[in-house]
Amino acid sequence: MINEFAMGDLVEGGIVTSTNPHLTTSSGYLIQNGQHLSLNPRHQIFVYFDNLQGFSCYRPFAVYNGNTLAGLHEFVVNRMLSLAGIELKCWDKAVGHYYRKPCDSVFSAEDTEAHFLVRPKSRTPM
């Protein structure tokens, strides 16, 4: 899994030319987890909250303009400061869909959705 990039890093297929939240390479693609990903720096991801009261997994919370998971996390926390420090698990499809998988660190040009599951902070016993 790809965690961090810096400009000038050599990746299979090219050199990283920009980073978080818009990752681009000189070749326009990236190999991630053995898969060829076409990159689109102006990509839009529809963001959903699947288990947060007042939100729906069928109606987008926001639209994120970028292609990295790190940039998406920062975008979501900036939009909802109450989520700072809370674990957000990202999935490519809503709860209940077949073949649902966790989001990778970079979204390909084909990825269009990010569904977040929010885990509450653990309470300490009194």
Image: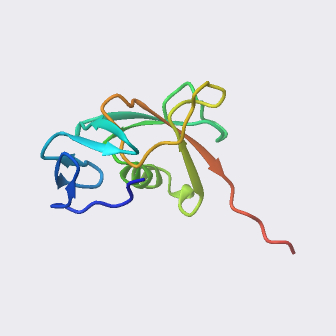
> 4 left or right of 94?
left
Q: Quadrant of the C terminus?
A: bottom right
Q: Quadrant of residue 7?
A: bottom left
Q: Is residue 15 above or below residue 114?
A: below
Give residue 49's position: percent from left, percent from top. Answer: 57, 38
Give residue 90's position: percent from left, percent from top. Answer: 53, 44
Q: In front: 61, or 47?
A: 47
Residue farthest to the right, as pictured: 126
Residue farthest to the bottom, as pictured: 126
**Which residue is depicted at the point 50% across and 34% down?**
92
Q: In front: 26, or 113?
A: 26
Give residue 17's position: percent from left, percent from top. Answer: 15, 53
Residue farthest to the left, as pictured: 26
Q: Quadrant of residue 8?
A: bottom left
**Which residue is depicted at the point 24% across and 55% down?**
19
> 117 left or right of 16?
right
Q: How many marks?
A: 0
The structure's colour scheme is rainbow
**Which residue is depicted at the point 73% across and 63% down?**
122
> 36 left or right of 1?
left
Q: Is residue 68 above or below residue 7?
A: above
Q: Is residue 57 above or below residue 118?
A: above
Q: Quadrant of residue 111?
A: top left
**Which residue is depicted at the point 59% across and 59% down?**
86
